[in-house]
Amino acid sequence: MAVYTDITDDELSVFLEGYDLGAPLAFKGIAEGVENSNFLLETEKGRYILTVYERRVKADDLPYFLNMLTWLADRGFPSARPIPDRKGATLATLRGKAAAIVEFLPGLSARRPTVAHCREAGEGLAWLHLAGEGYPGRRANDLGQTAWAPLFAKHRKAADDLKPGLATTIDKDLAQLALMWPRTLPSGVIHADYFPDNVFFQPNGKFAAAIDFYFACDDAYAYDVAVTLNAWCFEADGSFNITAAKALLNGYERRRPLSPAEKEALPILARGAAMRFFLTRLADWGSTPAGALVKPKDPLEYERKLAVHREGLTLFA
Ligand SMILES: Nc1ncnc2c1ncn2[C@@H]1O[C@H](COP(=O)(O)OP(=O)(O)O)[C@@H](O)[C@H]1O
Ligand SMILES: N[C@@H](CCOP(=O)(O)O)C(=O)O
């Protein structure tokens, strides 16, 4: 359960006095998620999500994320609009930690994404990329390719503990990725964590919304597509579902056609994207705060995806 910070009823009432949202009617912690503490908040004015930022989210980055959410919502993209307090600020402090209230978005995530979900998710991602164009905020991808080797250096032992000999394999992967990484692809605002739990669908299966923009940054659009392919198109048995992948790409291209260079780069981008999530999961393995009741995500799931990409993918005939 991702509730690291507990908020009492009194604290909530005092906090809400700063907003024009009326009195609280219901307030409960949300089990899903791993990064921040999230609460479902119902007030006399409506339903909201209260987030207390923890762990990886740097306070200095919060204006970038919150202003982006406002930017996207202003352009009609279905992301959660931040709610300003009575002074117009969207960033607040609660229990000494940064916090924000955002709009509650209806919709359900797909626990077992189908090919149709993949197509819709792909289209939603392209919509997000287009809606982000012109956003004036800048944030480098601090989990981009150049960050991987230094991150892995701190966790080599954990890798060998998980699977003897894995550290040497990862070293070789990192060297190849550094040599082959594309650096001139079209770039802009990317979500960078567009996993099934961060995408909502309407009851008719249509794309409804995207949440959890706290890894968003400037990077190649096709890298975001690669992160998404990895997150949505692998089967439980570890095989890559090419039909789902083609549907995802087809959905994406309904709104934003990929250039030949982007298509050509997808296999190496997908390998790098698998490395990125393997590494953060490896770093989290065993370092989850006591009492948070959060189950760390399995690094080996991404090590298996990495192994598939080592063999190379054929996405376009
Ligand atoms: N704007 C929102 N509208 C509706 N539900 C939300 C919203 N934001 C978060 N949630 C709920 O909270 C859960 C955790 O949110 P998320 O941002 O993914 O957390 P974390 O950053 O900790 O991973 C989501 O799975 C979803 O159920
Ligand atoms: N998607 C990442 C972990 C981040 O979790 P989220 O709940 O913020 O999406 C992973 O699977 O490793």
Image (tube, helix red, strand yellow):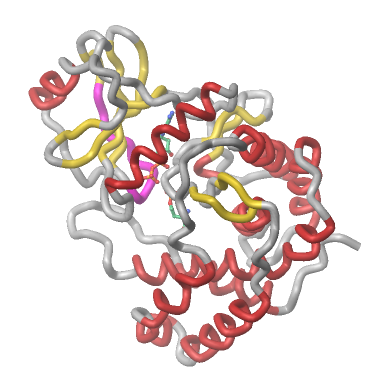
Q: Is residue 178 left or right of residue 119?
A: left
SS majority, magenta: loop
Q: Closer to the camera, 194 or 1?
A: 194
Image position of 139 with respect to 69: above or below:
below
Q: For residue 286, say whether it is visible.
A: yes
Comparing 236 with 122, the one in front is: 122
Q: Nearer the viewer, residue 266 or 75?
A: 75
Residue 1 seen in the current view: no
Could you tell me residue 173's position as x and y percent? 59, 82
- The answer to which quarter of the image holds residue 314 is bottom right
In the image, residue 173 sits, relative to residue 308, either above or below, namely below
Q: Position of residue 106 (x, y in %)?
A: 50, 23
Q: Is 30 within the magenta?
A: yes
Q: Residue at x 69, y 66 (%)?
A: 239
Q: Quadrant of the C terminus?
A: bottom right
Q: Residue at x 69, y 53 (%)?
A: 186
Q: Residue furthest right?
A: 317
The location of residue 17, given as percent across then percent down, is 15, 15
Task: Give the total of numbered labels.
Answer: 0
Q: Residue at coordinates 22% horizontally, 59% vertically from top-left?
A: 289
- The residue sitting at 74% across, 58% down in the picture is 241
Return the residue nearer the eye: 237 or 5.
Answer: 5
Q: Quadrant of ligand 1?
A: top left
In this view, 155 is above or below 105: below
The stretch of residues the image draws in magenta is 27-35
Could you tell whether 266 is left or right of 275 in the image? right
Instruction: Give residue 179's position: percent from left, percent from top.
Output: 64, 81
Q: Is residue 22 left or right of residue 130?
A: left
